[in-house]
Image (cartoon, rainbow, N blue to C red):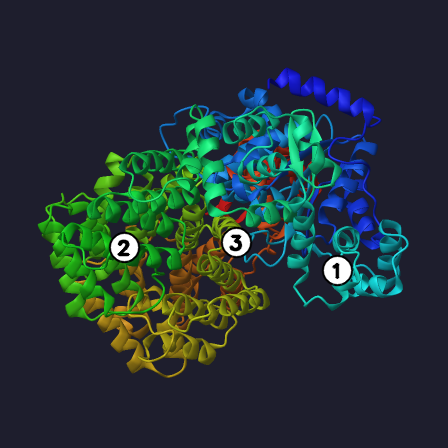
Amino acid sequence: MTQLAIDALWSERQQQDGGRRPFGGAPVVCGREDDIALIDGVIDRVRDGGAALVLSGEPGIGKSTLLELAQDRAVAHGMHVIHLSGVPSEAHLPFGALHQAIRPMLKQLKSLPPRQRSALQAAFGLCDGTATPDIFLIGLATLNLLTASAARRPILLLADDVQWIDQPSRDVLAFISRRLSSDPIVLLMAVREGLGVSFPYSGVLRHRLSGLSAAAAERLLDAAAPGLSPDLRRRFLSEAAGNPLALVELPRGERTTETIEAPWLPLTDRLERAFLSRVAVLPTATRVLLLVMAENDSRSLREVFDAGEILLGESTGLDTLAPAASAMLIEIHRGEVRFRHPLVRSAVHQSASPVMRHDVHAALGRLMRDQADRAIWHRLASTFGPDDTLAEELDDAATRSHHRGALAMAIPALENAARLSGTVMARSERLLRAAGLAADLGQPATVERLLRAAGPDQPQPRLRAQVALIRELSQPLTAIDPGRIPVLVHFAADARTDGANDVAQNLLWRAAQRCWWGNASDKVREGVLASAKQSGLPASDARLIAIAAYVEPLRHGHAVHQRLAAHADAGVADPVAAWTLGLAANTVGAFDFGLNYLNQASTEFREQGRLGDLARVLFARGWAEMETGNLMGALRSAEESIRFAEETGATVWIAAGTIVLATVAALRGKFDACEAHALRAERLILSPSVNFLLALLQSARGAAALGAGRSAEAYEHLRRLHIPGDPAFNTSLQFFSLVDFVEAAISCGQEAVASSFIAEVERRSGPVAVPWVQMMLSHSRALLAAPDRVEAFFQEGLGTIAQNWPFLRGRSLLAYGEWLRRQRRVMDARAPLRTARDILDALGALPWSERARRELRAAGETSRPQEGLALDALTSQELQIAELAAGGLSNKEIGARLYLSHRTVGSHLYRIFPKLGVATRAGLQEALNRSPQSAV
């Protein structure tokens, strides 16, 4: 039957039925006044700003009915309504639900920035992209299409049965749901409970639908099934327990007194049985078409009829489906047909024999030969035993999903391809590829299951090493496990003997990171570096440089510093290599180089939409900005790192970014804020074995106590990094707080402890330390030196090596001035104290600048009052937006940079202008010039 014939027949039937509303009449809602008021509220406020709302509840509780009511409300408000819904048989189609929703908007693709346009085209298979698009870039492109449309007419986006929407589309919905506060868009989602599906909708309003009240349930039952006997009425009210669907549907199939004595069944099973009782009495041809509907991944009537013709050997049409429509099991509108409720689909599916389901999938597979991504899953469902041809096609489907940015969809394709593979080697390699994707997605349980299925005892050294690498990548680096390091080195040797040098180097890079995070012994560290040097890689390889930095940052710091300088001159094209070099730089204390490389990496990751990686890079960049004196930049980077880490569910990096906030607050004298951030970070660090973060946290608390003049408390915080067995003990990070520890120890009368630690850092640093470490050593030596050597040490630390470290330079000048004043060289003390005050004022390091003021007063010189800072007037995100706007970027360009809608950017600017006392973008730069960095 052609589509024209279907449409003609439907129009005729519609006229006979009085022109019913598509897919049912107006929703009848009983006893849902509070739920309706909630929905009305978000719709009524849409022109002031959008919102997302998740409705959840058991099957039949009324979620879809409320979505239909919301549609009516939205239409009455002049809104544009967009639908998408999930169906189990469609869940394997990457971005299928998203495409269903925004297909009419694709003509506006040209308005998107090139990367966003390419990402969305790749997601929908409209182009062959050169790179796999990240899900967040696809989300941003979708958001921009929606906001552009909403600027003309507010939008209600309805997503029903979200639990069955394909994973990539769900991820995009999650992305959008957190970014609607400034746009006239309402996203209303309905989610069925009890299926064990998790949704990353943090910060989104949720509302669980409960059963109807007793009075409302009675009204609904009496309206749906008048004339019931008292026994049946009591039974249905009891069994339904306030579930609207049960109140309507159970009486239709159970009107006999035998039902009163029927055994108890869960409500969902009873509803399915009620629907099945109506299916069972339908004609055979009708039941066949219902099974085609249940197994198909489309609502197309034409496909249902064509598949029915293959299965029945005769043509079918609307008359064949009419009995099902009369039984209120399905709804038909023009060329589409759907079940009235997902439980009808479930009942039809479960009632069919495996043979019949096999035949239906085979028929659908034949129909869809020109639609490879759909046909392959029907062919899979109708195939038994090995089939290398189908396995290859599934492998190709996995590759297409990967290229479209749907990594989660590629895993089941590869797993099924492995099941159909005719050789053990092909099966293992496909399972390992699937495990690698699961590791990329942070799914350790899936990784372990796939690796076990691949076979733990791989005969080839290369495969054994690959298994080890995938398993390692699926595990967090944060947990201390020194015993894993020699195992990784062993597998790296396996990989190298089998020619897999890249796998070997990645294993050694992970081993080096574990050395740094986990207090490995000197012998273990030397073994990792020795193995890395045998790799045959050039000395300029980023991983080789980083391995040297991580296994012993002080001892190899100078050599690493020289390699970083060489790379800085040549530039780095690969963002992962830039990230690796940035981490290496931070690890040895070359934060100035680190900032350069991490800026390169963050720019490219931002363009690619790699928000998970970007969260980690921004944490590292924030620390580098803090150490190089850019406290405003550190705040911006840390806040954005936290935001993206929350988006990607990376708790450890939320904690890490929060520790940067705590440390910056300590330096600025915001001691209450520092402790609040520290407490939040502690709550996030669930495992006491995460000593890297605990060490940074204690350093932040030590800095706060020292700035507040509580030296004994500072010493107690900082000494924890030096006590073996303490959760904060970390040999790799001890030297980061060298100056704080030495100052606190001396103030507590622990000069011997301070001297011993200085000697240890000197011993490990070798003949030449990196400039930052040299400067800390000079400062620390000066605090303990004999009077005739103090000045030489201060001047050594304040030479050319100080130029990139303004905070440390300010503190050294302060300490130098204090010493000069104590030596009664008051006139000599004023110049370093004055410079220290100005530097520390400019940085916003108020406890230290106030200390410089006190010393200057004691030396007979007054200081001007401290000025207010833009840093204090704006939030971190507002500050970032203000700087980008001052730099000439448009709202759309800023939105693309920060993964926000341009209207959200505009709302931020609206709040920023009065805070800074400006009226236009032109005044932003002058206002920001009053920021801390302007005087550094």
Tell me where residue 14 appears, x and y as whole percent.
Answer: 78, 25
Tell me where residue 1 appears, x and y as whole percent.
Answer: 60, 19
Q: Against 532, is 91 above or below?
A: above
Of the residues shown, which amino acid type is indicated by label 1?
Ser
Q: Residues within 10 Å of mark 2 (few under 14, many from 20)?
A: many
| Label 2 or label 1, whichever comes before in sequence order | 1
Q: Which mark is residue 374?
A: none
Which-is-in-front pick, marks 3 and 1? 1
Q: Which residue is mark 3?
A: 646
Q: Nearer the viewer, residue 25 or 661?
A: 25
Q: Which residue is mark 1?
A: 210
Q: Nearer the viewer, residue 430 or 856?
A: 430
In the picture, measured across the screen, residue 214 lies left or right of residue 201, that is right
Residue at x-position 72% and y-position 25%: 152
Q: Which residue is mark 2?
A: 771
Of the residues shown, which amino acid type is indicated by label 3?
Glu
3D distance between C-alphas at marks 2 and 3: 35 Å
In the picture, measured across the screen, residue 805 lies left or right of residue 292, that is left
Quarter of image, res 749: bottom left
Q: Residues within 10 Å of mark 3 (few under 14, many from 20)?
A: some
| Label 2 or label 3, whichever comes before in sequence order | 3
Do the residues under discs 2 and 3 have CB atoms within 8 angstroms? no
Do the residues under discs 2 and 1 have CB atoms within 8 angstroms? no
| Label 3 or label 1, whichever comes before in sequence order | 1
Quarter of image, res 723: bottom left
